[in-house]
Image: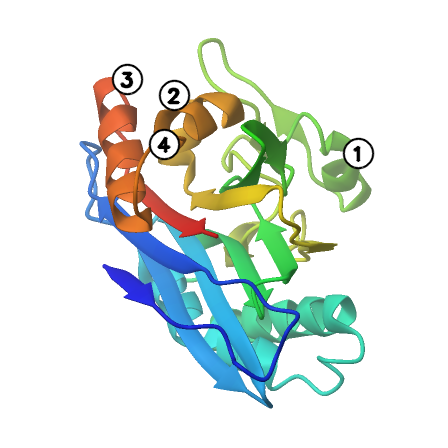
Amino acid sequence: MVTRYPNEKNNPSSRHFIHGYHLIQGQMNHGMEDYIFAQRRNLDGYDLGLYAIFDGHSGHEVAKYLRNHLFENILSEPGFWENPGQAIKKACKATDDQILENIADSSGGSTAVAAILVNGVKLLVANVGDSRAISCNKGRAKPLTVDHDPEKEKALVESRGGFVSKRPGNVPRVDGQLAMTRAFGDGKLKEHITAEPDVTIQKIDEDTEFIILASDGLWKVMTNQEACDCIKNVDGAQKAAKKLVKEAISLGSCDDISCIVIMF
């Protein structure tokens, strides 16, 4: 699906942008656990692009809850415009508390990578887990998030009383179970993990060509630069998103794959 909006005529500090997205269920032994949020909204005179990938695990209920509630909680957080980074962190904590309280099966969880694009020139990105966002600037990939890998954040897990282990042929896991150190939900592991996001805020300048948000079903088989190169000559955000998913499948990804492309 692709959506186009004109720039606000009364706002000279804006860039035109469009978005497209695509997702496909993988070949794993579970149902589809990914959810996408992609919406344009006018709020307080600002032209907002709201984009997120929610990659569920051990079920889809947490990812579905995030799709329905995360942005509403963020945008309604007092002080969002004055201190957006702090507001996003507070909203993520509140949302995680709601999930743990309201979803019966608290063993399931979800990652989240969310982006708020303001007038096409200011970008806020929040990341919890191993979904990822990158930008492409003059043909070069630039990471906007860092994966919350158990080996990289071993000290965080241990400081909360947990441990990181790795079985032969497998990936590092928190308490031998979860392949990431940050996630929404996962009530049985919550003492040892966190839903606190990394938040980055940056300007979108004329060198920025497009932004990609995707679940780890794509990043398991493609590097940041390979993803940029894959769609650098594609005309249209929707075609680009579909091409990325198709390429990930051709490279052997068996996981659910979700992808959003925002083009300027």
Question: Real-space Cα distance between discs 1 and 4?
Answer: 37 Å
By what rule are the colours in the image chosen?
rainbow
Q: In the rendered structure, which amino acid carries the disc numbered 1?
A: Ala
The image shows residue 116 at horizontal and vertical percentages of: 56, 65
Comes first in the chain, label 3 or label 1: 1
Dot 3 corresponds to which residue? 251
Question: Real-space Cα distance between discs 2 and 1?
Answer: 27 Å
Of residue 197 and residue 212, the one placed in the foreground of this image is: 212
Dot 4 corresponds to which residue? 231
The image shows residue 62 at horizontal and vertical percentages of: 40, 62
Task: Please tell me whether residue 156 is drawn above or below residue 141 in the rendered image.
Answer: below
Question: Which quadrant does the N terminus fall into?
Answer: bottom left
Q: The residue tagged with tag 3: helix, strand or loop?
A: loop
The image shows residue 195 at horizontal and vertical percentages of: 62, 57
Residue 203 sits in which quadrant? bottom right
Question: Real-space Cα distance between discs 4 and 3?
Answer: 15 Å
* Residue under the point 72% across and 34% down: 153
- The local crowd at label 4, few if under 14, some if 14 to 19, many if 20 or more residues have their Cα within 10 Å, is some
- In the image, 233: left or right of 149? left
Residue 190 sits in which quadrant? bottom right
Find out whether the residues at labels 2 and 3 contact each other: C-beta distance under 8 Å: yes
Residue 34 visible in rendering:
no
Mark carried by residue 105: none
Dot 1 corresponds to which residue? 155
Question: Real-space Cα distance between discs 3 and 1?
Answer: 33 Å
* Residue under the point 64% across and 74% down: 12
* Tag in front: 2 or 4: 4
Find out whether the residues at labels 4 and 3 contact each other: C-beta distance under 8 Å: no
* Tag in front: 2 or 1: 2
Dot 2 corresponds to which residue? 221
Find out whether the residues at labels 3 and 1 contact each other: C-beta distance under 8 Å: no
